[in-house]
């Protein structure tokens, strides 16, 4: 059988054909058959398109997303796509007014300055022939004075664990049996594993995501073995020292003026076992909630793992919020489980989520998606300009109102027209993306009304990459306790990272000052703990 000719109709053409059939003299039964074939053809084409889109989304999930290709999107218009009248003057006018060319791109990897090595050992090397004040060797009559030193960085290898074997001499009397042994020097700790080693172990496990068994194999290969069970015991010891600080961070997070939040899935073996005894309809999922709270110049990262959704976790935190602080700016996506039910917040939805819905179907609706993505791209250029010039929240708001508001108003009018004039199928992927954007338009555009309101939730999505990294490497937690320990330590590590504080040094300080930490945990928060640390005196060996 020969391949039939493919016929594609716009919505207007299909409606016009339907009207002509109804107005014709064709028998009623034949009309029903023809109109049924028309509806079936339309339904079949839409289903095939949706399947292709689903396969495209699956491909992106498995192999990663490609960058938006609006500049190279095919211009071969399908017959069912109505040519668009894109108001390029708006987007081009914005780009002309903004100093986008002078915005420095993100810093690539490569050569680092000596300033970047904060933990390096500095050795001053004096000139072997001359000193400051000497006569110039060129016999010009001048004197030599100190200039800027040359800086050369050398990096040498160093193992994760340095093992020291102390051989204690032991003496015994052959006649009376008197027995004596040498003692360890006073500067040697009584613990087999020192605090710094435990801190490094926590960072390797919960920041780099290395499983205990992999670390065990690695250390055995290097000749410094440490079993996975011992590693877990050491991590628990660290957790026992730091949980008062974690509770203090939880208590501070509710007072933030801006909170980002999102969820990711996680597996806990004990929960999977308990789920077998649960009734139908009972909650079985387990989640890691990522929370970022901004309090003035401080940033707090929190990770909470358990059966509660993001909205339930943040409700527990906001229950202690003081009313004097007003409503918090609350950034999340539009998923209902992310929204706290018992607390009023100023909702801000992620603009990147709305954009992503059009990026996913860009291949199938190139013209329409290009229009939306270009408008949103111009908005992000406005925001990049504000960051580049270090504008205050108020100045940034004024800039967005001047440049981004015309863009968003034009986009809103275009999106509304697509549905009102039946230019798109309301139930296909494009129609759903448009309806999603229009339905959540107000929280998606809060950056046009609220000083400091972010455009997207990318910062917390990036923060959740670390629990995802742990999940990909270790696959699961064994118990709820293990999940709690991991989330607590990761919260402290990431909060240190945000404050540009060495997490290994911080965790070490908390272990060495455990009693003081328990007595006054707020004095040992990452940004103020150095004021509490007593400098060590060097013991003579």
Image (cartoon, helix red, strand yellow):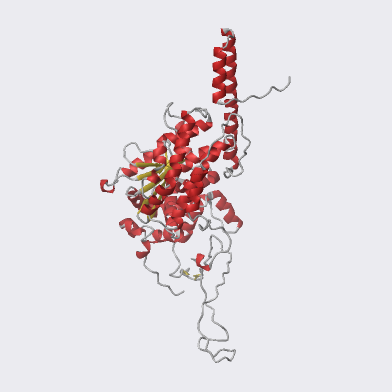
Work out whether residue 402 can be spotted: yes
**Residue at the (59%, 34%) spot, across then down:** 364
Residue with the most extreme right position: 1
Question: Looking at the picture, does residue 337 appear above or below residue 470?
Answer: above
Work out whether residue 338 can be spotted: no
- In this picture, residue 297 sits left or right of residue 171: left
Quadrant location of the N terminus in the rendered image: top right
- In this picture, residue 233 sits left or right of residue 73: left
x, y (%) of residue 426?
50, 28
x, y (%) of residue 63?
60, 42
Question: Looking at the picture, does residue 336 appear above or below residue 374?
Answer: above
- Toward the viewer: 288 or 485? 288
x, y (%) of residue 44?
59, 23
- Toward the viewer: 105 or 507? 105
**Residue at the (46%, 43%) spot, across then down:** 407
Count of marks, rendered view: 0
**Residue at the (73%, 21%) spot, across then down:** 2
């Amino acid at each position: 059988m020969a391949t039939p000719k493919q016929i594609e109709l716009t919505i207007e053409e299909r409606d016009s054909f339907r009207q002509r059939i109804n107005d014709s003299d064709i028998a009623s039964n034949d009309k029903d058959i023809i109109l049924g074939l028309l509806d079936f053809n339309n339904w079949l084409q839409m289903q095939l398109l949706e399947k292709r889109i689903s396969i495209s989304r699956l491909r992106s999930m498995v192999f990663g997303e490609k960058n938006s290709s609006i500049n190279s999107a095919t211009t071969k218009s399908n017959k069912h796509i109505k040519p668009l009248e894109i108001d390029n003057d708006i987007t081009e006018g914005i780009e002309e007014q903004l100093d986008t060319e002078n915005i420095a791109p993100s810093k690539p990897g490569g050569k680092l300055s000596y300033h970047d090595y904060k933990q390096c050992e500095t050795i001053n090397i004096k000139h072997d022939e001359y000193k400051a004040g000497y006569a110039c060797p060129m016999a010009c009559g001048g004197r030599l004075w100190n200039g800027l030193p040359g800086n050369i960085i050398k990096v040498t290898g160093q193992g994760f664990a340095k093992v020291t074997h102390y051989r204690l001499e032991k003496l015994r009397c052959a006649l009376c049996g008197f027995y004596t042994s040498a003692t360890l020097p006073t500067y040697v700790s009584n613990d087999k594993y020192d605090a710094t080693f435990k801190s490094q172990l926590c960072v390797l496990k919960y920041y780099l995501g290395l499983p205990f068994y992999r670390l065990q194999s690695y250390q055995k290969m290097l000749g410094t073995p440490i079993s996975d069970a011992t590693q877990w015991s050491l991590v628990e010891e660290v957790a026992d020292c730091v949980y008062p600080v974690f509770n203090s961070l939880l208590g501070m997070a509710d007072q933030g003026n801006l909170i980002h939040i999102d969820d990711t899935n996680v597996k806990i073996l004990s929960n999977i076992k308990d789920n077998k005894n649960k009734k139908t309809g009972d909650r079985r999922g387990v989640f890691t909630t990522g929370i970022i709270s901004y309090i003035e110049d401080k940033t707090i990262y929190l990770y909470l793992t358990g059966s509660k959704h993001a909205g339930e976790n943040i409700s527990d935190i906001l229950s202690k919020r003081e009313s004097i602080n007003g409503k918090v700016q609350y950034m999340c996506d539009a998923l209902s489980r992310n929204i706290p039910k018992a607390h009023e917040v100023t909702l801000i939805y992620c603009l990147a989520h709305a954009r992503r819905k059009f990026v996913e179907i860009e291949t199938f609706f190139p013209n329409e998606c290009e229009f939306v993505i270009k408008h949103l791209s111009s908005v992000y250029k406005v925001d990049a300009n504000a960051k580049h010039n270090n504008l205050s929240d108020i100045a940034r708001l004024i800039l967005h109102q001047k440049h981004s508001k015309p863009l968003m108003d034009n986009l809103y009018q275009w999106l509304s027209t697509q549905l009102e004039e039946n230019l798109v199928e309301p139930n296909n992927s494009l129609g759903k993306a448009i309806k999603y954007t229009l339905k959540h338009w107000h929280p998606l555009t809060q950056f046009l009304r609220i000083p400091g309101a972010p455009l997207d939730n990318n910062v917390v999505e990036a923060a959740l990459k670390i629990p995802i990294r742990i999940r990909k490497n270790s696959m699961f937690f064994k118990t709820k306790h293990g999940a709690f320990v991991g989330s607590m330590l990761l919260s402290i590590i990431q909060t240190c990272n945000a404050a540009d504080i060495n997490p290994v040094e911080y965790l070490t300080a908390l272990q060495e000052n455990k009693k003081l930490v328990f007595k006054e945990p707020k004095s040992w928060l990452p940004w103020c703990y150095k004021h509490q640390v007593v400098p060590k005196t060097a013991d003579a060996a």
